[in-house]
């Protein structure tokens, strides 16, 4: 598996820590953000292959972050994750054009597959 830089945007410290461990263990470089605002401040300089965004970021929705990124001209492949079973939200995310929508807890293999798809998508955007 090729190493990728993965931006992780999740307001839950335990989720960020767990994902950082998992991604690091397989050779990826996680870059962690606790909020949408924190990621937006560094979006222009990040070298992330993709962005893993939680749907519920406390003060904002992950889909709103993705829309802001898109409106600002950023073309990061996005993987959404959520513990919600709301099919409408999943449909909105898929309609937005995300690479994957993962329901927590998700199998590691699904995450790695989504990252591989995001990396392939990122090459097409270059």
Image (spheres, grey):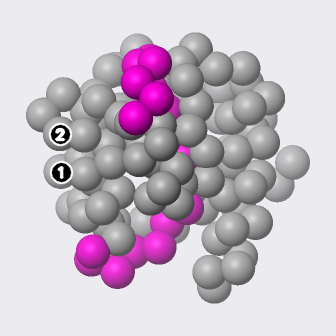
The circle drawn on residue 106 is none
Q: Position of residue 5 (x, y in %)?
A: 59, 54
Dot 1 alpha-carbon crowd within 10 angstroms: few under 14, some 14 to 19, many 20 or more: some
Report the quarter where the C terminus lies: bottom right
Residue 27 location, quadrant: top right
Q: Residue at x 72, y 20 (%)?
A: 107
- In magenta segment, residue 89: no
Q: Which residue is mark 2?
A: 60
Q: Are marks 2 and 1 in contact (CB under 8 Å)?
A: yes
Q: Range of the magenta residues?
A: 71-88
Q: Is residue 37 visible?
A: yes
The outermost residue toward the bottom is 126
Residue at screen point 34% across, 20% down? 13
Who's the residue at 64% across and 20% down the image?
Answer: 106
Q: Is residue 71 above or below residue 38?
A: below
Q: Is residue 78 inside the magenta stretch?
A: yes
Place of residue 7 in the rendered image (x, y in percent of width and height, measured from the top left)? 47, 49
Instruction: Locate residue 113 relative to residue 97 in the image: left or right.
Output: right
User: How many other residues sit within 10 Å of disc 2, few (<14), some (14-19) or many (≥20)?
Assistant: few
Task: Using the image, determine if residue 83 lies above or below residue 25.
Answer: above
Residue at the disc numbered 1: 37
Distance between mark 2 and mark 1 Cα atoms = 9 Å
* Picture quadrant of residue 53: top left
Residue at position x 71%, y 62% from top?
119
Q: Nearer the viewer, residue 124 or 8?
A: 124
- Residue 23 horizontal/vertical position (percent): 65, 34
Above or below 86: residue 64: below
**Element carrying mark 1:** helix
Above or below, 37 relative to 76 = above
Residue 20, visible in the rendered structure: no
Compare marks 2 and 1 and give the one earlier in the sequence.
1
Badge nearest the viewer, 2 or 1: 2
């Amino acid at each position: 598996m090729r190493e990728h830089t993965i931006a992780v945007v999740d307001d839950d410290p335990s989720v960020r820590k767990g994902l950082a461990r998992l991604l690091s263990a397989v050779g990826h470089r996680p870059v962690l953000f606790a909020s949408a605002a924190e990621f937006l401040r560094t979006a222009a300089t990040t070298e992330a292959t993709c962005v893993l965004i939680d749907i519920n970021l406390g003060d904002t929705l992950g889909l709103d972050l993705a829309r802001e990124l898109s409106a600002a001209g950023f073309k990061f492949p996005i993987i959404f994750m959520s513990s919600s079973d709301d099919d409408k939200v999943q449909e909105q995310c898929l309609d937005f054009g995300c690479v994957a929508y993962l329901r927590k807890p998700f199998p590691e293999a699904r995450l790695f597959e989504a990252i591989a798809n995001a990396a392939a998508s990122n090459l097409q955007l270059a």
